[in-house]
Amino acid sequence: MAYTVKFYKGDYLQRQQAANADRAVAYVEHHFNSGASPSAGYAVVVVGSNASSTSRNWGRWYARAVADQFGTQVGGDGGILVGGWAGRGDGNVKHTRMPAVLLEPLFASNPQQADAIRSEAGQAALARILAESIRRFFPDGGLVAFSVGHKYKTSSPNDRGAAMAGGGTEADHAELVLQKAAQLLAAEPAVPTQRMLRVMRGDTLLFETPVDEDATLSWSSERNLLYIADSGDAPAPRALPTAGKAAAPKAAARTAAAAGKAAAAARKTAARGRRR
Ligand SMILES: [Zn+2]
């Protein structure tokens, strides 16, 4: 199974109705936040006043991932604002029949965060987090609806949202991130996966290995060591085809075949146990 991404345009109600008619499995509207104080900066996701638990959990997961990646806080109630800011934002997502989120990952008005939004690396990181969140919460694939906040409204065609500190607009940069996320989603089929541990440098994945769902992970900054508590029958590491020699130990390659069998069995179990 695979993901298909479609960008919806027009006024917000029409976008949502069109996504409903297309039977999209997930709906994402991308914005950047803005505040009076240049130091304001946190990650938050608006979900509708009628949001399902999937929308809420998806929004919280995304906000936490952005906050961790960019060294900022989550806003709202653990990363989400149910029903928006006293109703503002609610109408952008509450008309969908599928889980929907309105993303406000960083502040366009915060000079440091605006630099990150303008950077290729920042956009790539935001796109990756969004694509990962969709793979995690909608592992069966399907049509994903993307909506660029502010841009392409019939009623207000010149709206581009907030001006970014240092230049550029909220809407143009939200569109760049969504385009990158669409490429990531199209690049790989939708496959439910077990828990994975990943090491990345910038946007490059250096290493990944499955870890037992019950395993405890601990990071030691003294030793620069991420320690996986041995749970006895932990899955064997998996070699990355693109990771190169340094990142793919030979032992990993030798056990990859055995791990593949175990992983396939685990995926079956996971797929059976998953409910939405
Ligand atoms: Zn906005």
Image (cartoon, grey):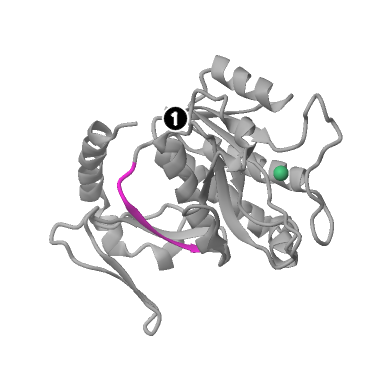
Which residue appears farthest toward the left when viewing the image?
A: 232
Classify residue 217 by image quadrant. Answer: bottom left
Name the residue at 39% across, 30% down: 140
Examine the rendered structure and indicate whether residue 247 appears above or below residue 154.
Answer: below
Quarter where residue 58 is shown: top left
Residue extending farthest right: 158
| Residue 154 on image: x %, y % | 80, 24
Q: Which residues are magenta?
A: 193-200
113 in relation to 195, above or below: below
- Image spot of residue 90 (x, y percent): 60, 35
In-image side of 5 versus 38 (left or right): left
Quadrant in the picture for the N terminus: top left
Q: Is residue 259 above or below residue 234?
A: above
* Quadrant (top left, top right, bottom left, bottom right) of the C terminus: top left
Residue under label 1:
141
Q: Main secondary structure of the magenta part?
A: strand
Please give the name of the residue rendered at 26% of the width and 63% of the height, measured from the top-left corner.
251
Q: Which amino acid lies under the numbered mark 1 shown in the image of this protein?
A: Gly
Q: Is residue 191 above or below residue 16?
A: below
Point out residue 80 in the picture as x, y percentages from the top left corner: 51, 48
Q: Quadrant of ligand 1?
A: top right
Residue 116 on the magenta span: no
* Other residues around mark 1 within 10 Å, as few (<14) / some (14–19) / many (≥20): many
Residue 224: % across, % down = 40, 79
Helix, strand or loop status at disc 1: loop
Q: Nearer the viewer, residue 53 or 234?
A: 53
- Going by the image, does 166 lie left or right of 98? right
Q: How many marks?
A: 1
Instruction: Report the residue that reaches farthest toward the front.
Output: 86
